[in-house]
Amino acid sequence: MLNFTLDAKTDGETILKGLRSIFQEQGMVESVHSWQDHGFLATYTSRNGSFASLRIYPHGLVLLDFQGYDSDAQAQGEIASLLNSVERRMEELSQDGAGRVKRLPPVLRGGAVDRYWPTADGRLVEYDIDKVVYDEDSPYQNIKILHSKQFGNILILSGDVNLAESDLAYTQAIMGSGKEDYAGKEVLILGGGDGGVLHEIVKLKPKMVTMVEIDHMVIQACKRHMRQTCGDVLDHLQGDGYQVLVEDCIPVLKRYAREGKEFDYVINDLTAVPISTCPQEDSTWEFLRLILDLSMKVLKPDGKYFTQGNCVNMTDALSLYEEQLGHLYCPVDFSKEVVCVPSYFELWVFYTVWKKANP
Amino acid sequence: MLNFTLDAKTDGETILKGLRSIFQEQGMVESVHSWQDHGFLATYTSRNGSFASLRIYPHGLVLLDFQGYDSDAQAQGEIASLLNSVERRMEELSQDGAGRVKRLPPVLRGGAVDRYWPTADGRLVEYDIDKVVYDEDSPYQNIKILHSKQFGNILILSGDVNLAESDLAYTQAIMGSGKEDYAGKEVLILGGGDGGVLHEIVKLKPKMVTMVEIDHMVIQACKRHMRQTCGDVLDHLQGDGYQVLVEDCIPVLKRYAREGKEFDYVINDLTAVPISTCPQEDSTWEFLRLILDLSMKVLKPDGKYFTQGNCVNMTDALSLYEEQLGHLYCPVDFSKEVVCVPSYFELWVFYTVWKKANP
């Protein structure tokens, strides 16, 4: 992709005439569509199946796209040289109104490795992914683990970047950013199938950590491919001071609430898009509120509830979440913190929620 | 951009016939180019100047691009609905070999605000930039300050993202990550026109900090628009315990070396692509080595030199840099640290260099 933003109005025909020879010298065949008021579209096809589209808008914008298939180094060099020629020619053509030029890195489409995982706020970002480590559908979601040169393996659940091996910052944030004393405490983790939270908490000698993860395939995949995150903590479903329940957390929470079991900490590390086997929750917000309500029920009066919120740019979603906190069965207070999680490419909001003391 | 990767070989003609009506129903005019061995390219132009290109490769890859100009919400809705129709139709057409579908966020081209600032390792990333705060050419470089919703203002020098107001992590890393005691020390900062390092160091009560920045326009722009980074430290070129020299650092370093002036810390915060008024340095590496050599000359025997290196993925460039460290006038040791700088979208390597003790 090559963009030219000219200061002056474009004489489209001059630009078209000026550029066409560059393509024709490459043996590309031109086909032109012109509009009365909207400029020109020229497409240039080459015999090897590659093509360029040149869109000349009348108000000074010229966009060139080049598309090739399975480009080796030589082909890439030829494309670069063609784009260089276009840049030089455009400079000559727009002498009296030199504008801005922008060449964007190529978008790699349809390959075995997908490098594009848009952010929560919808931006296009390319990851340095070089290998598909794992790609399976569980009964609940699609599970991908992709390798990034800089971030290590990245867990992607149903297209959503969950956690990379580089993302200790996420795990620390959802544990209260190092300000809590977990020694001798009762801890409940909802979700957390990558094992990151469990791995970090058991180091802190809690009395007992219970992790409730619905998707056994996530556990199996992370146990094998996210060792930097989970260590050996997922090798067995129970160990010194912890147990992993492979269950839907909703019935487990209900059972604990019924039994009067209480925790010092509840850490909600569920995926952003809720998955549950319970049919009665028909909207994301109802599901979130149900989880919150049940969590408050199993939380000691001085206990704390930690969770991740959303990207800091999703202000509406964050406000709606905070609104939900006002609709729980008991009054709560909350604080939030903005954290940079390396593999997210956006700042992330984490919440701490606690029960208001009785007046 | 919409990508379909089919499991089976594509019957290109069936797909073309199946999809064409979707475009024609929108009043778009078709023009088809077909290859003997390379499938089809269909372009669809609409009366309002927008167009789509549909490229059907024979081995199961179908790529659709839609380009429109100045899209309002209604136009965006229409585009989304057209892409939805194509997705549904493709599902019907590829029943026996359901493949992968990927729709990428739109690329915004040629607008007043450029949101695409590729990483050092050449990846395409979109920033949440919503405003051009400052855009001027100095005698040395183009200076842009762009506003990001999540990162605050971002300083971009000659197209290279230097620092955002969110990037205290950068400043802390290039100061030694909180492990140094600056109290009562002599400190030299090379570059650092954003004022971040100066601002953080003067808080630590050094004896004297000298900052040498060549580009007064960078200082002026950051003083005004990067307050989160520089505080009020750039409001005057000297203050309590610091001075700012608006000079090329090479002659300053040479003068200090000649005079025998020595520092406890030298912090090289120059831009990645060197700028200097000295004509004798004809390559980046020679320039880097000259800076290093001169810095070592003005460094106390037990002093430390801090600098940023490169993106962690640029392993060749990092190795070359480390090689240079073996070619200085005096033997040195070094350590490095990998740090996540929020606005970089890639992990960054920082170096500490010190003189080897005499045997």
Image: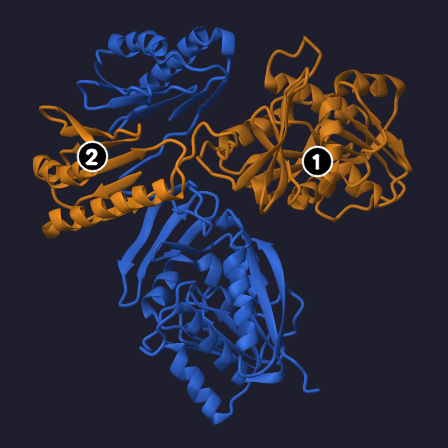
Chain colours: A orange, B blue
Which x, y percent locates residue B114? 33, 43
Which residue shows up at 44% across the image and 70% down it?
B285
The Cα atoms of the two marked residues, 1 and 2, are separated by: 48 Å
Q: Tag 2's secondary structure?
A: loop
- Residue A233 figure quarter: top right
Report the amino acid beneath label 2.
Answer: Gly
Which residue shows up at 28% across the image and 41% down it?
A2
Front residue (pair A230, B206): A230
Residue identified by numbered label 2: A27
Front residue (pair B250, B219): B250
Q: Are marks 1 and 2 on the same chain?
A: yes
Say above or below: B355 vs A118: below
Chain where mark 2 sits: A
Residue identified by numbered label 1: A225
Left or right, residue B180 beside residue B327: right
Report the amino acid beneath label 1.
Answer: His
